[in-house]
Image: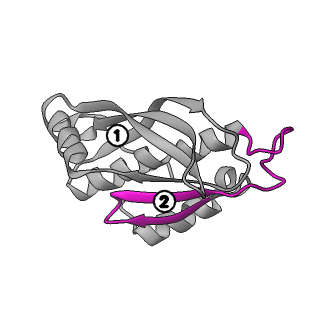
Amino acid sequence: MIISQNTLKWVMRLYPPLFFQRIWVQKFEDEFKSATVKISKSFLNKNYNGSIFGGTIYAATDPFYALMFDQLMQRRGFKVRVWLKSASIQYLKPGREHLYFTITVTDAMISEAERALKTVGKFVKAYPMEITNKSGELCATVMNEVYIRNLHQGETPTVAY
């Protein structure tokens, strides 16, 4: 289902697993080629050491590459199933204040996915993310592996959000 950037922003803001962990989508831009997210530190996501719980940081990064590729590929005429196949995180510094990250999907990334979907019917690739504090200090790095299947080859589409 193709939806607007503003609609998806509000759906994600109010989605309970993100909302209650204080994960706030600030914006989607450039027809889903960019997303900016804030992880607010609060009593709901603070751990024993007073920093943001690692699971909150990990959860914050989970949906965005999949959502963005889903919208981007649909706008290019593909019927796709997109999901996060795997992820890994490296915690580098405690998140003692609000954290931020921006994801950008480049034209080269889109072209690579389109070529694979047209030829082999699926695309799998890992992309990095950097989570920083307000001062720009790197607090965590994440690798998210996205899986995209071209449904024109038989699978029935369903909406996951």
Q: Residues within 10 Å of mark 2 (few under 14, many from 20)?
A: some
The residue to which callout 2 is attached is: 36
The residue pinned by badge 1 equals: 156
Query: What residue appears at the point 73 percent right and 45 percent down from the top-left corner?
Result: 52
Looking at the image, which residue is at 56% across and 59% down? 12
> Residue 68, relative to residue 119: is it above or below?
below
Rate crowding at label 1 as few (under 14), some (14 to 19) or many (20 or more) other CA atoms within 10 Å. few
Residue 41 vs 86, above or below: the answer is below
Tell me which numbered mark, 1 or 2, is placed earlier along the sequence.
2
Name the residue: 47% across, 49% down: 64
In terms of depth relative to the viewer, which is nearer, 27 or 146?
27
Q: Amino acid at mark 1?
A: Thr
Secondary structure under tag 1 reads loop
x and y percentages locating residue 53 in the rendered image: 74, 41
Does the magenta portion include 51?
yes
Residue 40 among magenta residues:
yes
Q: Is residue 8 above or below residue 68?
A: below
Callout 2 secondary element: strand
Residue 16 locus on image (x, y percent): 69, 55
Segment tinted magenta in the rendering: 24-53
Q: What's the CA distance linking mark 1 and mark 2? A: 31 Å
Three-letter code for the amino acid on which mark 2 is drawn: Thr
x, y percent for residue 103? 42, 51
Which one is nearer the viewer's eye here, 130 or 10?
Answer: 130
- Tell me, yes or no, if residue 158 can be seen here: no
